[in-house]
Amino acid sequence: MSNKELWVAFMTIVSREIRRFTRIWGQTLLPPAITMTLYFIIFGNLIGSRIGEMGGFDYMEYIVPGLIMMSVITNSYSNVVSSFYSTKFQRHIEELLVSPVPNWVILSGYVVGGSARGLGVGFIVTCLSLFFTDLQIHNLWVMVTVVLLTAILFSLGGFINAVFANSFDDVSIIPTFVLTPLTYLGGVFYSISLLPEFWQGVSQLNPILYMVNTFRFGILGVSDIDIVFAFSMIIVFILVLFAYSLHLLSSGRGIRH
């Protein structure tokens, strides 16, 4: 295929994915906004007023970066896992597999579509947070780069989940029993410096900790972990998941029957 044909194929998948979640915005964009608003009110205002400061900042300021990142993670993941599994379930995947479109174009299209939803919800949550606190921007480059890489990473994770899913119940297992606990334990609501040394070490095994803290550094300038190391870890995760996702597409595991 020529470069123009590859671009057309890529944009077709991306535009379909974006239309998919914008068409039902009441189910995809509105609920996360409401949920995050409740977090701002309950954790930020009510509980935060009793906690006081965290990491030298007002508690509301401290948790806002984590809540924004939480919305990006969950929505990037859920968009791809539900979309690609639906494509399998409805047998549309066969049309893609028999087409001359390379696997990396198919995968990139789904990842960009998932990232678009994650970033869109993240932007909405960021705008809502301005009603509760004044956001600072310590390093714009770090902030934008890490949120983009995180959206890509969890879009890839959602793709892998969709490949192995055999039912709609399988689509929700990973988000419910793996993704949600890791997110809550990823430093969204607290600094790991408050934990005993042993549990600080355990917390550093959680990849979401690196993303949340790097994003918090971009906004507030504080972090519990080294930023360069965090970026390195995120990029390694992306490369590994991208390569594995391409392998799954090429082998047809969970796709071809």
Image: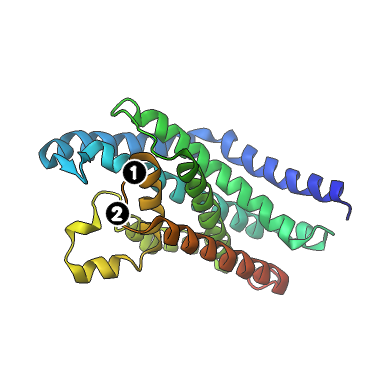
Q: Residue 42's quadrant in the figure?
A: top left
Residue type indicated by callout 1: Gly
Q: Nearer the viewer, mark 2 or mark 1?
A: 1
Residue 162 image position (x, y, % from top left): 57, 62
Q: Residues within 10 Å of mark 2 (few under 14, many from 20)?
A: many
Q: Nearer the viewer, residue 163 or 241?
A: 241
Q: Nearer the viewer, residue 145 or 163?
A: 145
Residue sitting farthest toward the right: 2
> Residue at (57%, 53%) from the top-left corner?
80
Q: Residues within 10 Å of mark 1 (few under 14, many from 20)?
A: some
Drawn side of residue 221 relative to residue 10, left or right: left
Drawn side of residue 77 relative to residue 223, left or right: right
In the rendered image, the vertical position of residue 11 relative to residue 37, given as above or below: below
In the rendered image, the vertical position of residue 6 relative to residue 138, given as above or below: below
Residue 191 image position (x, y, % from top left): 24, 53
Drawn side of residue 158 relative to residue 183, left or right: right
> Residue at (35%, 55%) from the top-left corner?
183
Residue 141 image position (x, y, % from top left): 50, 42
In the rendered image, the vertical position of residue 94 relative to residue 10, given as above or below: below
Q: Is residue 92 visible?
A: no
**Residue underneath mark 1:** 221
- SS for callout 1: loop
- SS for callout 2: loop
In the rendered image, the vertical position of residue 88 relative to residue 214, given as above or below: below
Residue type indicated by callout 2: Gly
Instruction: Say which mark, if any, is on residue 187.
Output: 2
Residue sitting farthest toward the left: 50
Q: Could you tell me if the residues under marks 2 and 1 are in contact, i.e. CB atoms within 8 Å?
A: no
> Residue at (28%, 70%) from the top-left corner?
202
Estimate the spatial distance between the alpha carbons at disc 2 and disc 1, rounded to whole Å.
15 Å
Precedes in sequence: disc 2 or disc 1: 2
